[in-house]
Amino acid sequence: MVEESSTIVTSTPSSASSLILDQLLFHAIIASVSEHVTPFIASTTTSLEAWTKLIGLYANRSCSHIMSLKDLLSKPRDSNPVAECLMTIKTTSDELALIDVPILENNLGLYILNGIG
């Protein structure tokens, strides 16, 4: 403890190590993003702020990615073989499940019937 003009300033090892850890994470985030993204997070001072900005930057792209995957499911197979159509539906469904947007089995059946029909 250090006493400074009637206020007591404490420096505990846990807060100092937390600050060091935060700065290490912050610099790891800065070092791992591309040079095009760095200006968007350069004004942040903590790893939480940098991470929150990154989430905001990529959230819209995630929504558009989900929409494009769902659109891919709803397209008919045209002249593609049935096996190829089924594989596309299966991989697209798996991709959606990986990003926490699973397709219900009922809907998956409809996508299959519409795709091959």
Image (cartoon, rainbow, N blue to C red):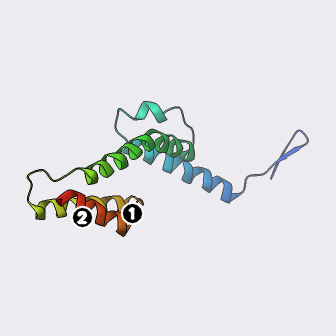
User: Is 110 or 5 nearer to us in this picture?
Assistant: 110
Q: Is residue 52 visible?
A: yes
Crowding around mark 1 (Cα neighbors within 10 Å: few <14, some 14 to 19, many 20+) is few
Q: Identify residue type, mark 2.
A: Lys
Q: What residue sits 27% from the left and 54% below the top?
A: 73
Residue receiving disc 1: 102
User: Is 25 or 117 nearer to us in this picture?
Assistant: 117
Image: 113 above or below 39: below
**Image quadrant for the C terminus?**
bottom left
Give yes or no for contact between labels 1 and 2 (Cβ–Cβ under 8 Å): no
Q: What residue sits 27% from the left and 52% below the top?
A: 74
Q: What residue sits 39% from the left and 46% below the top?
A: 62
Q: Identify residue type, mark 1.
A: Pro
Residue 111, x across and y down, in percent: 28, 60
User: Is 115 or 21 nearer to us in this picture?
Assistant: 115
**Sequence-wise, which precedes: disc 1 or disc 2?**
2
Furthest-right residue in this view: 6
Crowding around mark 2 (Cα neighbors within 10 Å: few <14, some 14 to 19, many 20+) is some
Looking at the image, residue 20 sits to the left or right of residue 74; the answer is: right
Secondary structure under the numbered disc 2 in the rendered image: helix
Q: Give the numbered dot on residue 92.
A: none
Furthest-front residue in this view: 117
Secondary structure under the numbered disc 1 in the rendered image: loop
Residue 92, x across and y down, in percent: 27, 58
Residue 75, x across and y down, in percent: 23, 50
Looking at the image, residue 50 sits to the left or right of residue 103; the answer is: right
Image: 100 above or below 24: below
Distance from disc 1 to disc 2, alpha carbons, whole Å, reads 12 Å
Asked which quadrant contains residue 4, the reply is top right
Residue receiving disc 2: 90
Q: Is residue 94 visible?
A: no
